[in-house]
Image (tube, rainbow, N blue to C red):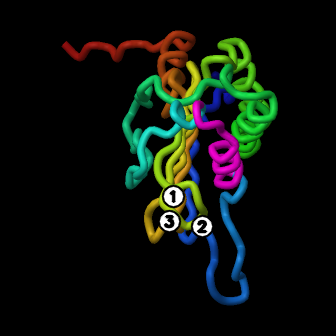
Amino acid sequence: MNGSSISGSPQFFGANPAEVHDGPMKGTRVLSAEEDLGRSLVKSLSTAQRTEALLSASAPGDILTSNQRKAAIQEDKGVAYSQLSKEQQGTLLALIEEYLGAQPRAQALARLDKIRHAGFDQIKFAWMGGLERGEGHYYRVQGSTFLIEYDNTQNNANHIHCVWRDFNGDWGEDLLAEHYQNSPHHQPASTD
């Protein structure tokens, strides 16, 4: 421990509005890369890939894991990294890297190492909702070590939530166990 342990998951970002429609900041978009990369990937999919990736024509009203203490592994659905073309794989990696880029460098590199060690082939991309800007939509990227969820349905699809969850260590889960394992704790003296 000694100040060297960090828990940065879940990493949650939100924006309301996601795009400013009026005033001097008109056209400003927050979390635009997360939206655009996800949409670019889903629109690049072949018919067969879309059959795997598109889970529903309607999107859920929010991210599915909500504020649960432990990130729940979602259904093993979506199009797998291994089923994507090289260009599509590049888009999916760029999307993952966009989320990693918002994290402290050391933490992002450690997460990327976990992803590499687990392997890219089983990472899946799933989409729900409309394909066009302004239509409510949701996507997730799920690997064996992490889950990314993105939702833009509220406020007429102009209110984004996105989150990175780790399946091990979310909410600092492992830090307390590490602390107790590595730091002596004395029982208070009995007053009997």
- Residue highlighted by disc 3: 157
Q: Secondary structure at mark 2?
A: loop
Residue 9 shows in this picture = no
| Residue drawn at point x = 72 percent, y = 88 percent | 24
Q: Is residue 170 above or below residue 66?
A: above
Q: Secondary structure at mark 1?
A: strand
Q: Are marks 3 and 1 in contact (CB under 8 Å)?
A: yes
Give the mark, 3 or 1, whose residue is nearer the N terminus: 1
* Number of numbered markers: 3
* Residue type, mark 1 in image: Asn
Q: Secondary structure at mark 3?
A: helix
| Residue drawn at point x = 63 percent, y = 22 percent | 1
Give the mark, 3 or 2, whose residue is nearer the N terminus: 2
- Residue highlighted by disc 1: 152
Extreme residue toward the front, this view: 47
Q: Are marks 1 and 2 in contact (CB under 8 Å)?
A: yes
| Residue drawn at point x = 47 percent, y = 52 percent | 129
- Residue highlighted by disc 2: 18
At which x and y percent is residue 89?
A: 75, 30
